[in-house]
Amino acid sequence: MAFYEENPQQVSKADIVVAIPSFNEAQTIGFAVEQAGAGLVEFFGNLESVLINCDNHSNDGTKDAFMKAASQVPKIYLSTPEDQRGKGNNLRNLFEKVRELEAKTVVVIEADVKNLAPYWIRNLGQPIVKGAGYVCPLYVRHKYEGTLTSSVVYPLTRCLYGRRVRQPDAGDFGFKGELVNQFLDSPVWTESIEHFGVDIWMTTIALNARMPIYQSFMGSPKIHRVKDPYAQLGVLFRQVVSAMFDLMAVYSDFWRMVKWSKPTALFGMDAQEVATPVPVEINMNKLHERFLKGFDDYFELWEKVFDQTHVNKLQEIRSLGLQHFSFPGQTWARILFEAFKAYSPMEMQQRSNLLDSLLPLYLGKVLSFVKKTERMSLQQAEEYVENECMVFEENKPYLVKIME
Amino acid sequence: MPKILVVDDEEHIRLLYSEELKEAGYEVITADSGYKLLERIDEEKPDLVILDIKMVDYNGLDLLQDIRNQYYDLPVILSTAYDTFKEDMKSIAADFYVVKSFDLTELKKKIAMALETRLP
């Protein structure tokens, strides 16, 4: 049960829920409510619908902004206690409410999206109404947007669980109401999942639930309020990777059986116009510096954790200099696999240190990606990512072998 | 013996694929268009579909959407003379994308991979 609930219209049943997790989003949540409400009326007018704000006890007036926003759709406000932060905790309250409302379709959208439009609700909800179990959006992205997804989350999720979900941690989803039972009963619930790790946690549970997964083409980028992508990079990286490793430990019986990967079904291919993503600037010198700094801070640990072949390979990569810098996909895949093997038996502090030590290597991998794709179109860069995923899949027997 | 359905409006492609894939140990059936393709799949229950994209009356990418919506896990390989269709977002619903060639090495490799793909 949520710590706090306001349900002024006494909603006790719903067919479809649109949920907006938040923390201090008073400036933006009104727009999200208006667009989501309009989407529910336009595309799901024949269903009983409700808008739910699952909040982190915001102190900037988010609740009032949500409740006052113009919409014909009834609203419910839920909140965690004051000292409990994180999107994961907000969603946990949502799951319980969905179970209580017996909702069949749930759509989650973020509160700070500037270009949210009513059709987004259709794209994330319609496949569920038609029988899908889980829907991930496919936003138009610049090649250097979402590098953690392109370099770690997508290839690892795809090679482990066998489904090609390109943006499995985009932050917005649609899912079948019954899936909340799997979420609430999950054996994995960590501090990372309470925060940034929750998106990939949800997708991974859906993949392991063997539900039909759709990707919905949104036809546009997702434009958030301006924030510095590197401001929380260390925390984001640590939480997402630790969530993935914790899930890998629990679902090992599943992923050991998966060979290669399969596509998903698609929705939203009728988009008339496709927007162009805003270019993302990357500072290659900074990436290179942080990669090199990793040798000063973590080389001793890497020597303990990684196979000697890969330690030698890292030294070779270091010696290339910026001009010829390249980080082979096979080395990257095997380093992540070996990191997982080392992570499993470690104490919390050791795990944290190991995850921190992977960050400079990840930045090196991003640098390599940027150098390889700087003259490529978005489509060509996308093919490059697909090829990197194949490298992960080809190397999966190595993961299975070292975990025996 | 895995059964492969080849959907292509060019007779010489159907013949070439049939001969070579039969030699490689597959059972092969063919269709010369996308007409009633879903019914055909329902009747024949192929293990894999090789689908041309640019056919006279049908667009293979639209047929792919229909197949994927009805037969979520049926392996489909897009086979086309043009590599530019790969830029169409719809093509990602295919297991693989192969550019037509008289050398079927790549196609056979992708067929083997698609058939050995294993999800619990």
Image (tube, coloured by chain):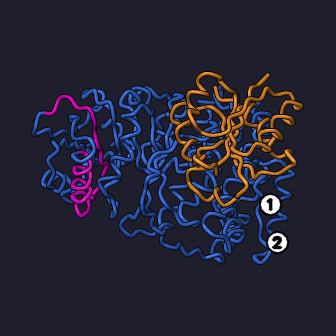
Chain colours: A blue, B orange
**Tag 2: residue type?**
Leu
Q: CA distance from mark 2 to mark 1?
A: 10 Å
Q: Reading the chain from its start, which is encountered first: label 2 or label 1?
A: 1
Instruction: Please tell me if label 2 and label 1 are on a single chain.
Output: yes
Query: Of B17 and A376, which appears nearest the observer?
Result: B17
Q: Which mark is residue B47?
A: none
Residue at the spot 80% in from the left edge and 65% down from the top edge? A317
Segment colored magenta: A11-40
Q: Which mark is residue A314?
A: 1
Query: Of A65 and B75, which appears nearest the observer?
Result: B75
Q: Chain of mark 2?
A: A
Residue at the spot 36% in from the left edge and 34% down from the top edge? A129
**Tag 1: residue type?**
Leu
Left or right of A191, for residue A163? right
Mark 2 = which residue?
A320
Residue A205 spot, x, y in % from top left:
50, 33
Q: Chain of mark 1?
A: A
Residue B41 spot, x, y in % from top left:
61, 28
Left or right of A397, for residue A375? left
Left or right of A18, for residue B75? right
**How many other residues sit within 10 Å of disc 2, few (<14), some (14-19) or many (≥20)?**
few
A210 w.r.t. A141: above or below: above
A130 w.r.t. A322: above or below: above
Q: Secondary structure at mark 2?
A: loop
Q: Any magenta on residue A233?
A: no
Residue at the spot 52% in from the left edge and 73% down from the top edge? A279
Asked whether residue B74 appears in the rendered view, the answer is yes
Quarter-of-image position of residue A194: top left
